[in-house]
Amino acid sequence: MSDKRLTFKKRLHILKHHYRDKKMAPAFNAIHTFLFSPDDTTHSGAHVRGADDLKRTMNMVIMALIPVLLFSMFNAGYQYYAAIDVANNVSREFSLWENFLTWDNFWIGIIKVLPLVVVSYGVGLLVEFIFAIIKGHEVEEGYLVTGMLVPLIVPIDTPLWMLAVAVVFGVVIGKEVFGGTGMNILNPALTIRAFLFFAYPTWMSGDKVWVYQAVERTGTPDAISGETVLGALAQNHLAELNYSVSDMFFGFIPGSVGETSTFLILLGGLFLIYTKIASWRIMVSAVIGSLVMGYIFNLVVDLGVISEASNFYGLMSFEYWKHLLVGGLAFGIVYMATDPVTGSQTNKGKWIYGFFIGFMSVMIRVFNPAYPEGVFLAILLMNVFAPTIDHYVVKANINKRLKRFKNATILPKDSDSRAEELKAETI
């Protein structure tokens, strides 16, 4: 066959075999398998064929994140112009078509949000390729989701160089040192977020970093503010909260790039449950845990245990169910707590794991007024305890079955078969 008649896929396949033993083979193979399914298939033995491979799983999560990304690009511009109107004492009424879904808003999203995405993917995949070449293994698809999550959980004015440093740290320390995708004990995206918080705290909190140009305008006549709902509550500025429940639910509030729209996050969660990518047990139990903790705080306020002068009054008095509508709690529950690598694997363990994530997220919010957001710390903490939870769940199950085996009555005629059955149940 003439070279001119070869398809693009065939040409790549020929190049793959040509560079098979070369140093750069892992990098080339990553591009090849990203564009096309591998031509190498098994020819012997019994094999279970399924469509749910790692690449499909990652693509499903990215599809669930795309609406959140698009919304965040419009919201970036909307919050910018809304903050300017507030600074100029201009009354502003929300209109979906007139002042939200506009080109001006979207353009700010393009110049601020897209660079975060590009840097996240560019730096993260570069590190992945370098480690694949050094170690001589295939490039894994694990960073495809992490690269999308990272720009959605940081403030919009995060410097690009800062994000690049954090991505290198997160990929190397959070994943590669443990052996790569599937071996890490901590969620890589949250590891990156934690690094940013502890290394550059002034860029991860306050009332300026959540709105475009708020940091640049500080100290000038054109200064603007973008205080979040949680920030206002932490400072007991209850009178300054002018956001409705609808604003908080649909996401027309300042915050990290992609965390504001609980509505779209909910749709993404339902999609991941429908496609069986994420665990509904973790999501439901995390919601229950956050509601329980929030209700306990509301009860403390209702009983008069603390007064309005307390530093914790604002967040404690916030209606318990509204905690799910603000901050990154909903985003963390849906897209990060359900990480199949770092979360619990047993069904009972998922209920325990998820419950404590929600419970501790709200607790950290209240008792850490300097940074009233606790979901990423709660998830990282439970990532560490997930193997322990599974260990004791499995151990309890084994002990239960051993006890049943010891107490079982076995008739003489079927003693052998019945004994084998009971032994099998203990495995």
Image (cartoon, rainbow, N blue to C red):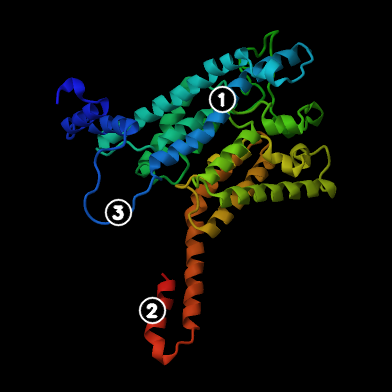
Q: Position of residue 38 (x, y in %)?
A: 28, 38
**Could you give the CA–CA distance between mark 1 and mark 2, rounded to whole angstroms?**
57 Å
In the image, what residue type sits under mark 1?
Leu
Judging by the rendered image, the residue that carries numbered circle 1 is 70
Q: Could you tell me the amino acid type at mark 2? A: Glu
Task: Please provide percent x and percent y for residue 103.
Answer: 60, 13
Amino acid type indicated by mark 3: His
Q: Earlier in the sequence, mark 3 or mark 2?
A: 3
Mark whose residue sits in front, 3 or 2: 3
Q: Identify the mark at residue 47; answer none if there is no mark.
A: 3
Q: Position of residue 209 (x, y in %)?
A: 61, 22
Residue at the (33%, 30%) spot, across then down? 35
Label 1 with label 2: CB-CB less than 8 Å: no
Read off the residue under disc 2.
420
Residue 232 shows in this picture:
no
Looking at the rendered structure, the secondary structure element under dot 3 is loop
Which of the two residues, 422 or 294, is positioned nearer the viewer here? Answer: 422
Residue that sits furthest to the top in the current view: 221
Q: Which quadrant of the rendered structure holds the N terminus?
A: top left
Q: How far across and down, in percent of the image, does residue 282 sit? A: 57, 50
